[in-house]
Amino acid sequence: FFFLLRLLPLPPRLLQSAGLCRAFFSLPLRVSRPAAPSGSLPAPVVLRPASSSRQPDPPSGADGLALASDPGGTLNLLAMVENLQGDSGRGYYLEMLIGTPPQALNILVDTGSSNFAVAGVPDPDVTSYFNTELSSTYKSQGIDVTVKYSQGSWTGVLGTDVITIPKGIYGSYTINIATILESENFFLPGVKWHGILGLAYNALAKPSSSVETFFDSLVRQAKIPNIFSLQMCGAGLPVSGSGTNGGSLVLGGIEPSLYKGDIWYTPIKEEWYYQVEILKLEVGGQNLELDCREYNADKAIVDSGTTLLRLPQKVFSAVVQAIARTSLIQEFSSGFWTGSQLACWDKTERPWSLFPKLSIYLRDENSSRSFRISILPQLYIQPILGIGETLQCYRFGISSSTNALVIGATVMEGFYVIFDRAQRRVGFAVSPCAEVDGSPVSEIEGPFTTADVASNCVSSVSFHEPVLWIASYALMSLCGIILLILIILLLIPPRCQHRYTDNDVVNDESSLVRHRWK
């Protein structure tokens, strides 16, 4: 059969939001039918894990979790179903009412940061902002706060106010809230949210970990279980920024209607980000054969605020080579893999059949076992732009990273993800909305033995941000002292300085100057 493939540069607006360069490439491809691989392995036998690794639906209240609706109490988990809107390209957001009288704002759900912040002044890229002067319950703490992300940053002032969540838990609660006064590359053109809800641990909170996070405040004041769960329903849908895709943020429990099958849990290695331990990756069923520490360099986290699956550079290169090798497209422009180009097919075609499945192995709660979460190409070959009536263009939903492996929306859209803070674990279950043309695009299988991987794939040295700040201040102080000494030496009168003799002169023969790099 014959496919027409065109690689087009991203439009300027998409390039601005993604930080990509312009490029153009056009390539017609003739693709042969896949041949059955020689020596194919038999289909894997899915074993049933013991109770320590998977969780069937327990009765309400088991382990302190809220698992059923309770219309008369604080929690009504069914009321939180489909309380999100958005897509993997621009993020998923929750409607929230802030202040007295309440001001309605859309808040981005981000499990990779810990501050609750909203636009506090007009901004050309947001349609609404929180006007503190109109709220009788707002109290400024007079503390400046700055938060930097992998892309973008903002500066604001810390304060407190009351919030309610129309499709969340009952009641109003007093929460720390930062009003954003200045930002750079944070609010982007076309986004439909006006603030960010950081759901990670207080270790990441700014300006210090003493700032109580949004979810910690809810747990303390509403007395809900210390757990939340997240479903994002954008699998196979265009990454358009229209905000039409749904999702659910369940605060305080697990809603059984949002998943099917069993929940598999992996331990949280460190309570700052939701850091987990990845043991290996497979592309098309083939192990990448990398040292497991490469997958966790320098951390592996679950982050709903990251749009793509981000991989350390060495892992990313291995994945791209494996996909290119096992896909039916043997020649492909590098611009597609790096994100600077889109691949376009006729709208009657489905390019997903050309690409392999990607599997991530996570350590089970029983450390001698693992389980794998798999995503089909429908999740990482993402429709993003239609051209005319004939072409649909796609982007590569995986990118390289310099400091982490990030399980972002590309993967999370395939699963119902449980952030069980009470038992220090992250759970994954197949999401019913992760289907394209009626077929599931995500899988969970296990258990598998971990005899072929190291007993610990995570570095024992953990450089948390507070430690980095201390180290930075120490280095700045040292540099200041050295600079002060140099200034004093420069101000010493010449007569006090040593007069060199011919024997003191250092020449090229007796120094490393002649060995310098040119």
Image (cartoon, rainbow, N blue to C red):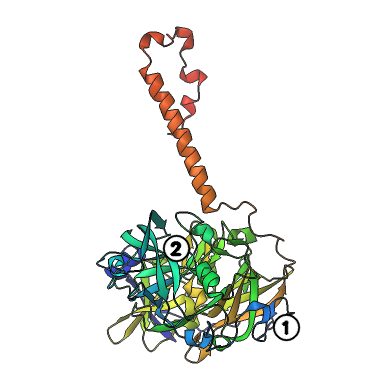
Camera sees residue 328: no
Q: Amino acid at mark 2?
A: Asn
Task: Tell me where residue 273 appears, x and y as whole percent.
Answer: 54, 63
Q: Quadrant of residue 486?
A: top left
- Judge the density around disc 2: few (<14), some (14-19), many (≥20) Cα neighbours within 10 Å: many
Task: Tell me where residue 466 appears, x and y as whole percent.
Answer: 52, 51
- Residue placed at 42% from the left, 59% from the top? 149
Between residue 53 and residue 314, name the one nearer to us: 53
Task: Tell me where residue 413 appears, x and y as whole percent.
Answer: 49, 78
Q: Quadrant of residue 284?
A: bottom right
Query: Does residue 284 appear to the left or right of 478 in the view shown?
Result: right
Element type where label 2 sits in the image: loop
Query: Does residue 491 appear to the left or right of 312 in the view shown?
Result: left
Task: Tell me where residue 440 appears, x and y as whole percent.
Answer: 54, 87
Query: Does residue 181 appear to the left or right of 161 in the view shown?
Result: left
- Residue placed at 50% from the left, 19% from the top? 509
Between residue 402 and residue 37, name the one nearer to us: 402
Compare marks 1 and 2 and give the one earlier in the sequence: 1
Quadrant position of the N terminus in the picture = bottom left
